[in-house]
Image (cartoon, rainbow, N blue to C red):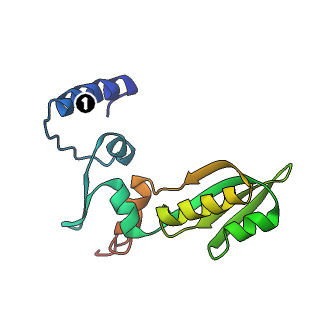
Amino acid sequence: GLDPVGRRSVRTVLESLRSEGKTIFINSHLLQEVELFCDRIAILSQGKVRHLGTVAELSRALNSQADLVTWELAGADPDIQAALAGHELVSQTPLGDGAVRLTVRLADQAAIDRCLDQLRQRNVSVMLLSRQRLSLEDAFLNLIEPVAQPVGANL
C-alpha cells in the first residue's frame, strides 16, 4: 500500500541490506516488484511449492515464450529464409525499405547464435534482435492455472 516514493524508500533500505550480505524474505502479490528486486523466488499454490529458483529458470522450465526471438532484418528475402530455415516462423511483418520483422521459435542460445552467424554470412543487416521472456506474472499464471480452481468451485 505504498505510494511510489514510499516504495523507492523501502527498496533503498532493502538494497542496502542486500549489499551487506543479508538475506531478505519478501511475501507479495505485487509480482512486478518481486521481479525487480528478488534474485530467487518461490511460488506457492494450494500449500505446495510450485517453483523455487530464478525467474529465468521458471521461464525455461515452462518452455513457453522463452524461446521466441524477434528479429528486424534488412536483406534479400531468399538469404533471410535460408538463414532461418528449419525454425518455426511465428510471425512476419514488412517494415518497408526492404526490412522485415520476424518472430521465430528457436531452441536455445546456440540456435540464436547459428542463425545470427548465417544471417551475417549472407550480408543481412540485423537491426534488432530481441529474445522474449515471460514476465513473472505470466510465468506464475502459467504455472498455477492447471491447479487453480474457479471461484466458488467448493461451495
Q: Residue at x 68, y 67 (%)?
A: 83
Q: Quadrant of the C terminus?
A: bottom left
Under circle 1, the secondary element is: helix
Horizontal relation, residue 111 to residue 92: left or right: left
Q: Residue at x 76, y 59 (%)?
A: 93
Residue 145: % across, % down: 38, 70
Residue 6: % across, % down: 32, 25
Residue 61: % across, % down: 36, 68
Taking depth in this image into account, of 60 and 135 the one nearest to the observer is 60
Residue 43, quarter of picture? bottom left
Horizontal relation, residue 8 to residue 20: left or right: right
Q: Residue at x 55, y 61 (%)?
A: 112
The vertical placement of 1 against 145, above or below, is above
The vertical placement of 38 against 134, above or below, is above
Q: Is residue 151 visible?
A: no
Horizontal relation, residue 75 to residue 106: left or right: right
Task: List the residue tagged with mark 1.
Answer: 15
Q: Quadrant of the N terminus?
A: top left
